[in-house]
Amino acid sequence: MLSLTSTKTPVGTLYLISNEHVLLGAGFRSFDDLLERMDPTDSSQQHSRVKSIPIISDLVSDYFDGDLSAFNSIQTRQPGAAFSQAAWKAMRKIPAGKVWSYADLAKRAGSPDAVRAAGSACARNLIAPIIPCHRVVKTGGALGNYGYGLEVKDWLLRHEGVA
């Protein structure tokens, strides 16, 4: 059984979907947006809306309250090819307050020439901002893109202390 909850944040409502203590989806659009992008094996499960998801909701609140390492304790799972999995794993190693370029991400995910694939992994990330694709920017520091809008990406980076 999937648990669905939402929480108000300074940059909008964050929608969360979990299977017990594993986060399967997070984003600033809607439950439907997340369910459509999830693995069909997961999204076809029965689900219920809950007031909060034990542990996960608290950690999300802690992050927005200033504990920038809170996301590190959230277990996640999402479908994706081997390179995307490597890129998402690498993204979780970007410390709050730091940014990597798409080229850095490609290299740390094991394929230095796969810069476009690194960008695609960011775009397909189903668990933002917990898997912090907002910490990936263009070479030279320009923000690049963000599926939930550049104003959200900018706010998250400023919240984490990136000038």
Image: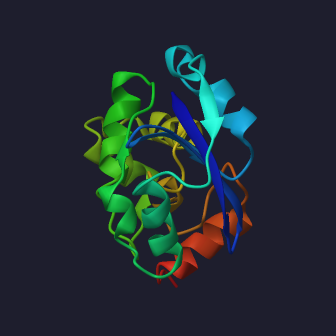
Q: Is residue 52 left or right of residue 111?
A: right
Counting the numbered discs, the total is 0
Q: In the image, residue 138 lies at what x, y percent?
A: 53, 59
Residue 59 is drawn in which quadrant?
Answer: bottom left
Front-most of residues 99 and 33: 33
Q: Is residue 84 left or right of residue 124?
A: left
Residue 19 is drawn in which quadrant?
Answer: top left
Front-most of residues 40 and 45: 45
**In the image, residue 105 above or below residue 10:** above
The residue positioned 39% from the left and 34% from the top of the image is: 77
**In the image, residue 9 above or below residue 137:** below
Mark yes or no: residue 103 visible: yes
Q: In the image, residue 40 lies at what x, y percent?
A: 56, 15
The residue positioned 44% from the left and 31% from the top of the image is: 78
Query: Coloured how?
Result: rainbow
Q: In the image, residue 122 lies at what x, y percent?
A: 52, 44
Front-most of residues 100 and 74: 74
